[in-house]
Structures are given as structure tokens and as C-alpha cells.
Image (tube, helix red, strand yellow):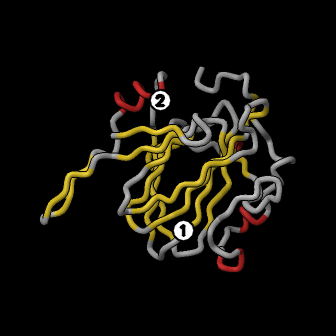
Amino acid sequence: MRFTRSNIPDVIIIDPQVHGDERGYFVETFRQDKLEAFLGFKVNFCQDNESKSSKGVLRGLHYQLSPAAQTKLVRVIQGSVLDVAVDIREGSPTFGQYVAVKLTAENKKQMFVPRGFAHGFVVLEDDTVFAYKVDNYYSPENDRGMRFNDADLEINWILEESELKLSDKDTKQPSFKDASHFDYSENLYA
């Protein structure tokens, strides 16, 4: 596995080593020891989630507040997405900036999204299967979000807005300025 820091150093892009031949392939999709050695701290994933979506579905931008803040390790099993993580840690040198990475079944890339980030993705192909690990259980009372098309964020979602399909929840999210944020000085892994 190769770990690469993105333009926001806390967001990590992971390229697993794929072993393949005419029979198919084998890939290690998760190694806790290697991830923790790279990060320098422990992450204890407790839940795996999976969704299947059609082209144009946009899910996000979502996060959970402390004490239920979540780290995510995301990947695509089938199809492709543009995956986005937004730094919402007030006081961070990258506050309000984002990382966008194309995750596909072919490239097998993964993105490590730490606590303190809003996360979302747009589906680029029909029948896309998106999977991710989290290190905290879903907490409805701590569930938050922000508008995917906020002008302050200027996220390029690749698809035209007219092509996007959003849940009712995601059409009613607050702006980046009005959303709840984290404090950069707080240790979210304590």
C-alpha cells in the first residue's frame, strides 16, 4: 500500500497494490497496522457501510459532531465517484479548503477522511457501489451537513447541477458559514 498526503495533509490517498493475471486480481484493501504507522495514531473502525447509486446521485456534505465525530476510509467497489472532503476545523490553515479525488473500481484508490471534515461524493456511473469504514457509530443527534454547492467552497463536482440527484435532506443543508464547525485546537482523537 502506498500512502500519499493530499493538498490537505490530514487527508490521505491510499493506493493498494493489486496482484492480477488472466484469472482476476487480489488486493489488500485495509491494513490497520500500516495505516496507523503512517498516521502516527490509532484508528479503531467499528462499522462498515455500503451504498449503491445511479449516475448523478450526490450524497453530502455530511459529518458528525463530537463526541460522535467520524473518521472514514472510503473506496469504490463498482463504478466511479468524485469523492470530496472539506476541512471544517476553524483555525486550521486549510479551513474551508477541500480535497477531491476520483475513486473507481479500476484504480482502487481509497481516501482517508479524518474527523473534522465534511464528506460527500457524486456518482459518475450507474450502478456504482461505494463502501466505507467509520470509527464511530451513526448518531442522529450529532448528524450535520452543509450545502454541497456553497459559493464559499467552490467545489467542482464535474457534473452539471441539472444532472444531480439529491435527497430532500441534502437540498436543505445550511451554508458553510452557517454550519457547525470543529475547533482545530481540539484533539478529535482523544
Q: Residue at x 51, y 70 (%)?
A: 53
Q: Locate residue 38: give its quadrant.
A: top left
Please tell me whether residue 158 is drawn above or below residue 176 in the rendered image. below
Single out the residue that lies furthest toward the right: 178
Q: Which residue is mark 2?
A: 43
Quadrant location of the C terminus in the rendered image: top right
Q: Earlier in the sequence, mark 1 or mark 2?
A: 2
Judge the density around disc 1: few (<14), some (14-19), many (≥20) Cα neighbours within 10 Å. Answer: many
The vertical placement of 173 against 44, above or below, is below
Query: Of 16 and 118, which appears nearest the observer?
Result: 16
2 relative position to 86: left or right: left
Q: Amino acid at mark 1?
A: Val
Residue 81 vertical placement versus 142 (above, below): below
Q: Which mark is residue 110?
A: none
Element carrying mark 2: loop
Residue 24: x %, y % from top left: 18, 62
- On screen, residue 187 versus residue 22, left or right, reads right
Question: Looking at the image, which residue is at 47% across and 44% down?
Answer: 13
**Left or right: 98 as drawn, with respect to 23:** right
Q: CA distance from mark 1 to mark 2?
A: 27 Å
Question: Residue reaching furthest front?
Answer: 7
* Residue at screen point 65% across, 22% down: 187
Is 1 on the left or on the right of 19, as rendered?
right
Q: Position of residue 71 (x, y in %)?
A: 55, 38
- Specify the quadrant of the image occupied by residue 61: bottom right
Neighbor class of circle 2 (other Cα within 10 Å; few <14, some 14-19, many 20+) is some
Q: Could you tell me the amino acid type at mark 2? A: Val
Disc 1 marks which residue?
A: 123
Between 108 and 170, the residue placed more toward the observer is 108
